[in-house]
């Protein structure tokens, strides 16, 4: 039998869970009252709050928490006054009640550590006494309402409380069944292959008998002894056929039984895991219920008016994800109230409602994802200020900053230390909030993106998986090793033709939905050797990964398939390894690494940024020894033409020059060249038109073109790709090694 102390600890644990539910219900009820509902709804809400306070008081008494019991008794008396319309539902009263709930929460969080505030208790008791005195002054007291009959739970709806630690343990055990399920599937495949191999061998073996019979008939009389030996061999083979047939039937039966067992085990495991997952699912309302109260307190503290609207609270998500996403949503709410929502006077001046609007909408995106959209109608994010702050901190160079579009500038707001606020407050302004938000969301294999309109507000789109631990994964092979990429981040698996790969500023790109997407080797990012082939393949398998608004295509050696994956940690010694999220076991027993997509995207960007100086895609320098490649340089500036000619000839190339696009086109029609290096801005025919004309000419369509120009805008670079250029190098950041790297790759 447990001791009294052990029993009390168990009772306290049960009480805390129950108390949190009562406290949350009272807080949400008070917020509903502040919205001034109809008389009928008001009565129902007050009745509900009154009962919650009464139930919490009784529960506190059962575990000897006198301070909580005293405060609940005072709250119950005040709610009784509201219930009987003896107390007006004024803002000061609601402020006092919210303050009382805050203190109550502190007492519940640390029993014995926090203390009841006498001044607060006295104010509540005074209000309750005043309401009681008014009730006693009435001439005809009302008959007490009959006690409500206890409501029996509906059939099948009975519930019990289970410790989350026990639930997590059951979940882990259920998920462990994925390994034997995958192994059973692999055994069925192996057995099927064995049956097929046996059948093929049997077919070849029986194919020998006609030849042996023919050989026996063709032997001369003097070969009677040899003919007898052949006959005995044939008789043995015919007799052995019965044994082979028995073995074949046995193998086929084992194969059918193995497949049936695999189907049965898969069904049981899937159903069990799904049921246990259901136990972990909680409605989003359990997370979102605390936010209206937080929004009210923050708005009051900043002298603002805010109306928070929540939808989709009934959608269920893994409890572990809800716990992790609570802080990011709180950060967004603080930022919105502190920076986004304008003061009432400013909103009036801008012809907006005095009360700012914040909305949180939860929606099911597909069977495995949920989207949370956090939006406000405030001032929006100032892109110019973001640029200035990024330049001030040195996050991006000023020339590169000017080439960023609005989406890329907004993505900078997630960088640590970046803030456009001129003042650091207790709520925000340190430049850490959004960085923490993205970090926590990406840790959950989720993504976040920003949309904003000046004067109209900001919208954050958060995409999260519905559950953790198990997920669908894409199995890829790189450098003779297998890796798993979470399917939630895989936007597309495809093959890209070698002719569609373009080079933009020494970076490989591929076309995707009308846009150029960065293309990198996964082996390079993981610092593994590339697989070399004797002949250049016509196409390459790629996996396009998306995180927020960013897209990067990773070239792999092979895409093996897709399957359910159970992630295992790497142990305490390897708790945080760059680019790795954990490991999993395939049905063959092979342990494979599970890739961390956020890390992978960052590593790809860093790899591309350091590529020219540290790790060129192909060896730099001139053409293959003994072969002089011919290059046509098209440039209207004498100085630039001479510079390019000198660089290329020093690298071992044979160089011919042209003064503009028209001169170049004529030269190309009369000579043989391996590559064209051209300026863009030239008289008579510019570089874009020259490239377009070459692509329309059957003789010149396959000739590589490198555009070297001062035009650095995104529109010009995209136009260069559209007309068919293989590479686009900006003169402002020109480095001769960049040019030589590109040329070495193209010819």
Image (cartoon, grey):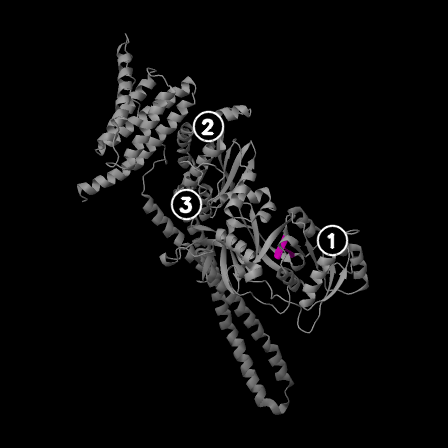
Mark carried by residue 611? none
Q: CA distance from mark 3 to mark 1?
A: 60 Å
Residue 274 coordinates in the image, percent (x, y) = 43, 46
Q: CA distance from mark 1 to mark 2?
A: 56 Å
Q: Nearer the viewer, mark 3 or mark 1?
A: 1
Identify which residue, 670 or 581, lies in the foreground. Answer: 670
On the image, numbered disc 3 is attached to which residue?
277
| First along the sequence among labels 1 and 2 | 2
Residue 144 coordinates in the image, percent (x, y) = 28, 16
In the rendered image, residue 505 lying in the magenta stretch gets the answer yes
Is 335 situated above or below 592? Answer: above
| First along the sequence among labels 3 and 1 | 3
Q: Residues within 10 Å of mark 2 (few under 14, many from 20)?
A: many
Direction from residue 154 to residue 413 in the image, left or right: right
Q: Residues within 10 Å of mark 1 (few under 14, many from 20)?
A: many
Q: Are marks 3 and 1 in contact (CB under 8 Å)?
A: no
On the image, numbered disc 1 is attached to which residue?
687
In the rendered image, residue 168 lying in the magenta stretch gets the answer no
Q: Which residues are magenta?
A: 501-510
Identify which residue, 108 or 568, lies in the foreground. Answer: 108
Direction from residue 172 to residue 657 in the image, left or right: right
- Find numbered disc 2 in the image and state the secondary structure of the residue it sits on: strand
- Find numbered disc 3 in the image and state the secondary structure of the residue it sits on: helix
Is 360 situated above or below 606? Answer: above
Residue in view at x 24 percent, y 38 percent:
11
On the image, numbered disc 2 is attached to which residue?
306
Identify which residue, 57 or 188, lies in the foreground. Answer: 57
Q: Are marks 1 and 2 in contact (CB under 8 Å)?
A: no
């Amino acid at each position: 039998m447990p001791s009294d102390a052990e029993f009390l600890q168990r009772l306290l644990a049960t009480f805390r869970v129950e108390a949190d539910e009562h406290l949350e219900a009272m807080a949400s009820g008070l917020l509903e009252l502040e919205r001034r509902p109809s008389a009928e709804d008001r009565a129902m809400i007050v009745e509900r709050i009154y009962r919650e306070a009464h139930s919490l008081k009784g529960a506190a008494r059962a575990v000897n928490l006198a301070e909580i019991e005293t405060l609940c008794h005072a709250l119950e008396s005040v709610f009784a006054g509201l219930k009987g319309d003896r107390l007006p539902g004024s803002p000061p009263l609601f402020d006092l009640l919210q303050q009382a709930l805050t203190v109550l929460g502190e007492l519940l969080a640390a029993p014995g550590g926090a203390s009841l505030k006498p001044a607060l208790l006295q104010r509540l008791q005074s209000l309750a006494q005043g309401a009681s005195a008014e009730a006693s002054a009435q001439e005809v007291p009302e008959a007490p309402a009959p006690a409500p009959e206890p409501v029996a739970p509906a059939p099948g709806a009975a519930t019990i409380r289970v410790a989350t630690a026990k639930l997590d343990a059951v979940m882990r055990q259920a998920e462990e069944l994925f390994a034997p399920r995958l192994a059973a599937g692999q055994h069925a495949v192996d057995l099927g292959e064995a049956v097929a191999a046996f059948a093929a061998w049997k077919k070849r073996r029986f194919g020998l008998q006609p030849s042996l019979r023919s050989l026996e008939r063709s032997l001369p009389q003097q070969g009677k002894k040899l003919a007898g030996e052949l006959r005995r061999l044939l008789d043995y083979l015919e007799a052995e056929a019965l044994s082979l047939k028995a073995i074949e039937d046995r193998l086929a039966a084992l194969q059918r039984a193995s497949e049936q067992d695999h189907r049965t085990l898969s069904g049981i495991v899937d159903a069990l895991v799904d049921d246990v997952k259901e136990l972990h699912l909680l409605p989003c309302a359990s997370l979102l219920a605390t936010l209206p109260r937080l929004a009210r307190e923050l708005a009051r503290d900043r002298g603002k008016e805010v109306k928070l609207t929540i939808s989709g609270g009934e959608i269920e998500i893994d409890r572990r994800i809800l716990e992790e996403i609570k802080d990011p949503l709180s950060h967004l709410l603080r930022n919105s109230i502190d920076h986004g929502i304008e003061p009432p006077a400013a909103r009036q001046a801008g012809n907006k409602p005095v009360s700012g609007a914040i909305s949180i909408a939860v929606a099911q995106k597909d069977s495995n994802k949920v989207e949370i959209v956090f939006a406000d109608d405030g001032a929006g994010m100032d892109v110019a200020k973001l640029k200035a702050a990024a330049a001030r901190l040195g996050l991006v160079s000023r020339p590169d900053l000017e080439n960023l579009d609005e989406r890329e500038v907004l993505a900078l707001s997630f960088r640590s230390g970046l803030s456009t606020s001129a003042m650091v407050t207790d709520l925000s302004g340190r430049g850490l909030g959004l960085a923490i938000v993205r970090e926590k969301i990406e840790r959950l294999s989720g993504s976040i993106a920003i949309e904003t309109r000046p004067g109209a507000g900001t919208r954050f789109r958060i995409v999260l998986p519905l559950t953790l631990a198990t997920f669908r994964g894409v199995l890829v092979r790189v450098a003779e090793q297998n890796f798993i990429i979470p399917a939630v981040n895989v936007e597309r698996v495809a093959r890209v033709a070698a002719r569609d790969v373009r080079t933009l500023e020494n970076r490989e790109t591929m076309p995707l939905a009308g846009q150029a997407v960065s293309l990198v080797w996964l082996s390079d990012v993981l610092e593994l050797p590339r697989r070399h082939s004797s002949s250049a393949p016509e196409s390459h398998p790629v996996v396009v990964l998306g995180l927020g608004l960013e897209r990067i295509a990773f070239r792999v050696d092979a895409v093996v398939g897709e399957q359910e994956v159970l992630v295992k940690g790497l142990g305490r010694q390897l708790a945080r390894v760059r680019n790795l999220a954990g490991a999993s076991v395939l049905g063959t027993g092979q342990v494979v690494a599970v890739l961390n997509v956020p890390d992978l995207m960052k590593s790809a960007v860093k790899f591309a940024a350091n590529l020219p100086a540290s790790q060129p895609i192909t060896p730099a320098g001139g053409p293959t020894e003994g072969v002089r490649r011919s290059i046509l340089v098209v440039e209207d500036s004498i100085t630039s033409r001479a510079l390019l000619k000198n660089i290329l000839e020093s690298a071992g190339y044979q160089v011919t020059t042209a003064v503009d696009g028209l001169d170049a086109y004529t030269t190309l029609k009369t000579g043989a060249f391996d590559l064209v290096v051209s300026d863009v801005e030239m008289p008579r025919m510019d570089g874009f038109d020259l490239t377009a004309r070459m692509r329309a000419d059957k003789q010149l369509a396959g000739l590589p073109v490198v555009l070297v120009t001062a035009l650095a805008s995104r529109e010009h670079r995209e136009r260069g790709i559209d007309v068919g250029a293989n590479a686009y190098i900006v003169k402002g950041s020109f480095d001769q090694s960049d040019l030589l790297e590109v040329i070495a790759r193209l010819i």
